[in-house]
């Protein structure tokens, strides 16, 4: 017989409350940046609507709450500015005027509709051969260097540092090809892109370098845009220049801002997705990697489970348009809300064993994502592309690119095995910068099969 449970003393209750309390500084701590998931769980369980007085925002962590916010345009807006006040578009972002600046407005719908169909369906299909070609070319170079190093006695086996030699370059080469930019300028684009990204997450000299890269890129794009106006081709710049929505086209600054955004939104994210897929196969689930080697079609499951378990983008922001009540808390009008996508994806109210990476899980919708987030199979989707009006425009392209890259990499690298990796955690730690999380170094060894 077990002894009846004693009620808690006041002192014990206070101790428990203190243990469950969350200090806003925890969001800036090295422990959180490295591994945010324990704090996410405490937030979900004890503070599902948490007021962070230090960073001046409210943090939302449960899956269902995040979905409700994404789907509720009446109470939540993405606009950083007060729609009733003054705001000069294009002055706050390194990209220039771009779709991310607009809230739930008609202008947002217009800009989105102008180009959204370029990254899905038949339009996307026409670009797939390019994507394949670039993956093969890049992997061919890596393979050839390894073969030379072995032949000259510098190495005993094939070796690649995947982040610097492949992932940070591949998506940007894909996008610049889609845009129709000259192939000999790809390296310049990779450099501009890296500075733009730096300028996004960090201030001071990084922002200045980002702005300089932006200005250089804009000057470079001017004649290409004029050419596309006069003699349109099949490239993305021509399509963006000529795309119309209700008889309207984008102006020149919007076109350039849009191209800059595509380089960053499509590059920095997909690059990290590919790195995370390899990282989790090599280090988290080498047993399941054996299954993927036998059946490469499973890369699609690896992509989806990665977007749930360790999504590239951990935070998204919204602002309340009126007073909102959530979990007994009252959130005032024009308050910043942080949606912790990485926390919602690990919500045990939705996913079984959420802290286990499992490409065969039966409670996650494994196929193509839907903007509505509602799946006919009744399963839940990951939150990694957002949902609703601002749902990622490149979702289909990112998935295709990542899967093509991983499949071609695995074809070229026989017997791939881990050598060394650094997963720094959230690499853009400040809460204003999207919270991207990925490995920063990933060395892989492989056999160079001369056959
Ligand atoms: C794995 C790769 C990617 C991830 C994790 C990702 C993630 C996201 C997320 C979470 C949002 C939602 C923003 C919000 O709710 O406010 C978003 C929006 C967006 N993404 Fe992606 N993205 C990826 C790839 C791409 C690619 C390849 C492109 C372009 C070719 C792209 C272009 C965009 C654009 C333009 C938006 C803004 C959409 C809007 O405001 O209507 N993304 N992305």
Image (cartoon, helix red, strand yellow):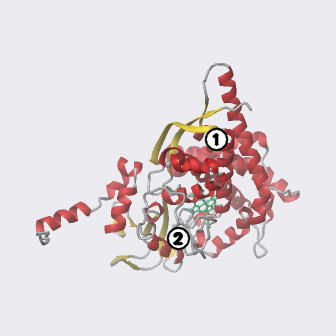
Q: Which mark is residue 424?
A: none
Classed neighbour count for the residue bearing mark 1: other residues with Cα under 10 Å, few (<14), some (14–19), many (≥20)? many
Image quarter in which the N terminus is found = bottom left
The residue drawn where x is 55% and y is 68% is: 381
Compared to residue 151, the image places residue 367 above or below, namely below
Structural distance between the alpha carbons of marks 2 and 1: 32 Å
Determine whether, in the image, residue 233 is placed left or right of residue 132: right
> Residue 385: x percent and y percent?
57, 63
The residue drawn where x is 37% and y is 47% is: 30
Compared to residue 413, the image places residue 320 above or below, namely below
As drawn, the residue found furthest toward the front would be: 1
Determine whether, in the image, residue 419 is placed left or right of residue 235: left
Determine whether, in the image, residue 239 is placed left or right of residue 100: right
What secondary structure is found at the residue carrying circle 1? helix
Compared to residue 383, the image places residue 84 above or below, namely below
> Residue 26: x percent and y percent?
33, 55
Please tell me in which quadrant of the rendered image residue 417 appears: top right
Q: Which mark is residue 166?
A: 1
Asked if the residues shown at circle 2 and circle 1 are in contact, with their CB atoms under 8 angstroms apart, the answer is: no
- Tell me if residue 415 can be seen: yes
> Residue 264: x percent and y percent?
62, 52
The residue drawn where x is 65% and y is 51% is: 296
Labels 2 and 1: the sequence-earlier one: 1
Q: Judge by depth and name the residue closer to the eye, 381 or 423.
A: 381
Q: Judge by depth and name the residue closer to the eye, 424 or 231.
A: 424
> Residue 349: x percent and y percent?
41, 70
Is the CB of the residue bearing disc 1 within 8 angstroms of ligand 1?
A: no
Image quarter in which the C terminus is found = top right
What secondary structure is found at the residue carrying circle 2? loop
To which residue does mark 2 refer?
A: 380
């Amino acid at each position: 017989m077990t002894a009846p449970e004693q009620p808690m003393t006041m002192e014990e209750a206070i101790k428990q409350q203190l243990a469950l309390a969350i200090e806003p500084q925890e969001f800036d701590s090295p422990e959180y940046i490295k591994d945010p998931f324990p704090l996410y769980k405490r937030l979900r369980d004890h503070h599902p609507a948490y007021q962070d007085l230090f960073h001046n925002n409210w943090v939302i962590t449960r899956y269902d709450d995040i979905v409700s916010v994404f789907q509720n345009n009446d109470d939540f807006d993405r606009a950083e500015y007060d729609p009733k006040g003054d705001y000069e578009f294009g002055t706050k972002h390194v990209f220039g005027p771009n779709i991310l600046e607009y809230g739930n407005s008609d202008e947002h719908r217009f800009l989105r509709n102008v180009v959204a169909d370029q990254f899905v369906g038949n339009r996307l299909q026409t670009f797939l051969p390019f994507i394949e070609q670039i993956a093969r070319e890049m992997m061919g170079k890596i393979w050839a260097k390894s073969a030379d190093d072995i032949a000259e006695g510098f190495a005993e086996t094939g070796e690649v540092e995947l982040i610097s030699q492949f992932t940070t370059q591949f998506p940007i080469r894909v996008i610049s090809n889609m845009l129709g930019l000259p192939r000999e300028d790809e390296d310049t684009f990779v450099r501009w892109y890296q500075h733009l990204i730096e300028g996004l997450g960090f201030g001071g000299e990084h922002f200045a370098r980002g702005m300089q890269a932006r200005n250089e890129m804009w000057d470079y794009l001017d004649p290409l845009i004029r050419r596309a106006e006069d003699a349109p081709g099949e490239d993305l710049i021509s399509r963006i220049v000529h795309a119309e929505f209700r008889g309207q086209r984008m102006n020149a600054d919007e076109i350039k801002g849009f191209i800059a955004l595509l380089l960053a939104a499509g590059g920095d994210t997909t690059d990290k997705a590919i790195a995370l897929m390899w990282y989790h196969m090599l280090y988290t689930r080498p047993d399941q990697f054996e299954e993927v080697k036998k059946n490469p079609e499973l890369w699609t499951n690896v992509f989806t489970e990665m977007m749930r378990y360790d999504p590239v983008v951990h935070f998204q922001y919204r602002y309340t348009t009126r007073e909102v009540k959530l979990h007994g808390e009252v959130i005032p009008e024009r308050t910043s809300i942080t949606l912790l996508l990485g926390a919602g994806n690990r919500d045990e109210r939705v996913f079984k064993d959420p802290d286990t990476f499992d490409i065969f899980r039966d409670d996650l919708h494994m196929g193509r994502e839907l903007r509505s987030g509602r799946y006919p199979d009744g399963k839940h989707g990951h939150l990694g592309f957002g949902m609703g009006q601002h749902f990622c425009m490149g979702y289909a392209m990112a998935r295709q690119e990542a899967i093509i890259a991983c499949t071609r990499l695995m074809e070229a690298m026989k017997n791939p095995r881990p050598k060394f990796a650094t997963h720094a955690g959230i690499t853009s730690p400040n809460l204003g910068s999207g919270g991207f999380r990925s490995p920063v170094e990933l060395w892989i060894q492989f056999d160079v099969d001369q056959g």
